[in-house]
Image (cartoon, rainbow, N blue to C red):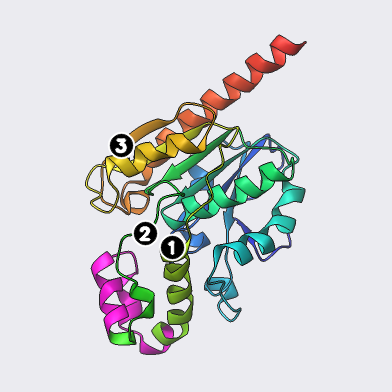
């Protein structure tokens, strides 16, 4: 796959379905580097690499959702030739929702399931402080308190300076994006950290307004970044989601034969 937007961490010869993984604000495709070895070999894990970070460090990051998704759409549509699942964590969940909304409007294939992890529903507004507009010192302190940025980055002033524009852009998208509610035709699974104080139960339940199916909320031990601290439980649940969607697809195919 020769595309800067997508990172595959292992080669799959016999792919039956794909899972597209969107990172949280300030994150990158490396978050999902171990997922391929923890899922079935026929599942192709595709981590989305947004501009302004890691292998795309010197590209201009997007600071608004509409432009980001407009750029992503023509890149991802050719990869929807197999059954797929979309996973997003925190901001990644909202990017995933907006992408799927635009795909649905264009009558493109929809996923077997959308997994929204660690996020308020995409149509709810952000009530937190507009941290991306603060001076560098204040913004950096906010990042430290959120504990989502590796501590070693704060010890490397040159690297931190390179990453600040991307971090500001991500947090601006997170703080300003509010989806126009559209009911997706796919089911939505909600993952939530048991110790996550950033997202309330009401904000999780609000995802029900964004699908024609029933949502399911599953709690995983950990704080807001449980996908990093508790990969095993996270991947075990995703495996269950994949198996369930496979069975549902098989039943549908048998019913139409």
Horizontal and vertical percent position of residue 256: 75, 12
Q: Where is residue 181 in the image (x, y as percent from the top left)?
A: 52, 45
Residue 35 lies within the magenta run:
no
Q: Earlier in the sequence, mark 3 or mark 1?
A: 1
Q: Give the range drawn in magenta.
A: 138-159
The foreground one among 218 and 198 is 198
Dot 1, crowdedness within 10 Å: few (<14), some or many (≥20)?
many
Single out the mark in the foreground, 2 or 1.
Answer: 2
Image point 32% across, 76% down: which residue?
Answer: 152
| Mark 1, secondary structure of its residue | helix
| Residue at which label 2 appears | 126
Residue occupying image coordinates x 76% and y 40%:
81
Q: Is residue 152 magenta?
A: yes
Residue at 54% across, 48% down: 97
Quadrant where the N terminus sits is bottom right
Q: Could you tell me which residue is drawn at 46 percent across and 36 percent down?
A: 209
The residue identified by callout 1 is 174
Q: Nearer the viewer, residue 59 or 186?
A: 186
**Where is mark 3, residue-wise?**
219
Is the C terminus in the top left, top right, bottom left or bottom right quadrant? top right
What is the C-alpha distance between the residues marked 3 and 1?
Answer: 23 Å
Please report contact status of discs 2 and 1: CB closer than 8 Å, yes or no.
yes
Residue 49 x %, y %? 58, 63
Q: Which of marks 3 and 2 is in front?
A: 2
Residue 27 can be seen in this image: no
Residue 72 against residue 121 in the figure, above or below:
below
Q: Is the magenta stretch mostly helix, strand or loop?
A: helix
Front of the two marks 3 and 1: 1
Spatial CA distance of label 2 from label 1 is: 8 Å
């Amino acid at each position: 796959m020769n595309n800067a937007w997508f990172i595959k961490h292992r080669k799959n010869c016999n792919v039956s379905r794909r899972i597209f993984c969107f990172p949280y604000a300030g994150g990158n495709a490396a978050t999902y580097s171990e997922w391929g070895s923890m899922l079935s070999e026929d599942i192709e894990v595709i981590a989305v690499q947004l501009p302004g970070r890691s292998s795309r460090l010197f590209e201009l990051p997007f600071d608004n959702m509409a432009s980001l998704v407009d750029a992503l759409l023509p890149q991802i549509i050719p990869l929807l030739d197999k059954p797929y699942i979309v996973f997003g964590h925190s901001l990644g969940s909202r990017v995933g929702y907006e992408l799927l909304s635009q795909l649905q409007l264009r009558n493109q294939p929809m996923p077997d399931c959308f997994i929204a992890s660690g996020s308020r529903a995409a149509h709810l507004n952000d009530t937190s402080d507009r941290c991306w507009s603060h001076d560098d010192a204040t913004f950096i302190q906010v990042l430290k308190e959120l504990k989502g940025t590796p501590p070693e980055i704060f010890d490397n002033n040159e690297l931190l300076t390179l990453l600040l524009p991307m971090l500001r852009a991500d947090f601006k998208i997170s703080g300003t994006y509010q989806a126009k509610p559209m009911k997706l035709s796919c089911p939505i699974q909600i993952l939530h950290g048991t110790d996550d104080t950033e997202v309330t139960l009401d904000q999780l339940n609000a995802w029900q307004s964004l699908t024609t199916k029933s949502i399911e909320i599953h709690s995983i031990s950990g704080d807001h970044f449980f996908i990093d601290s508790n990969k095993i439980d996270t991947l075990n649940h995703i495996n269950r989601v994949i198996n369930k969607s496979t069975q549902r697809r098989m039943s549908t195919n048998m019913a139409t034969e």
